[in-house]
Amino acid sequence: MTLMPAKTSSAITINASLPHVFQTAAAMDPCALIQDHGPLPGIVNCQGHTEPWSAIGQQRKHTLSDNSSVNEELTAFELDEHYAYRVTDFTGPFAALIDQANGEWRFTAVSPATTRVVWTYSFTPKRKLAAPAVWFIVKLLWPGYLGSALARVKQKAENENRNL
């Protein structure tokens, strides 16, 4: 029996062109993007594919600040539109709770110099008993985690845009 994933999204508007924002997000160092947020760990090391996301099948392994790790694989990629990835092989506290997670970034031009980014995550619980804990993490903790990372993308893209 497949359990229903718990899903959340966060969005931000960035004052830079869509191609620039897309490239900034796809190329951002995971350690700079995903930092500790409340009880959620940040990425402290990335192995494997360390270049900008650009092709389906690219993989990398992240070590997190709580000494756990996850594997990430790019599952969709449309230049200047969206990319998606699957996160598997959780270790640490999430290993007992989560079977897999899926992340997707969508980019929309609001104007020639403004871009809206929506980042959606869905987590599939490992077992039915884990579903309430997964729901709590995804609905109450994860939006702030995503929002703080999107704020870092915004800051980087807008700072670079000023220097273009």
Image (spheres, helix red, strand yellow):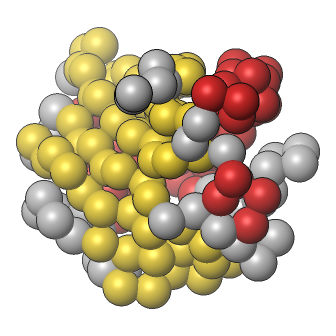
The spot of residue 99 in percent (x, y) is 50, 47
Q: Residue at 16% of width from left, 65% of height from top?
A: 57
* Image quadrant containing the N terminus: top left
> Which of the 4 image quarters holds residue 42?
bottom right
Query: In the rendered view, would you say 144 is above or below 76?
Result: above
Q: Residue at 25% of width from left, 57% of height from top?
A: 74
Quick check: 131 left or right of 51? right
Quick check: 27 left or right of 109? right
The spot of residue 11 in percent (x, y) is 51, 21
Which is nearer the eye, 104 or 116? 104
The spot of residue 152 in percent (x, y) is 61, 48
Query: In the rendered view, would you say 88 is above or below 122?
Result: below
Which is nearer the eye, 57 or 100? 100
Q: Residue at 38% of width from left, 75% of height from top?
A: 60
Quick check: 17 left or right of 156? left
* Image quadrant containing the C terminus: bottom left
Return the residue found at the far bottom.
47
In this orientation, does residue 113 appear?
no
Return the residue found at the far front.
1
Quick check: 151 left or right of 13? right
The spot of residue 45 in percent (x, y) is 60, 82
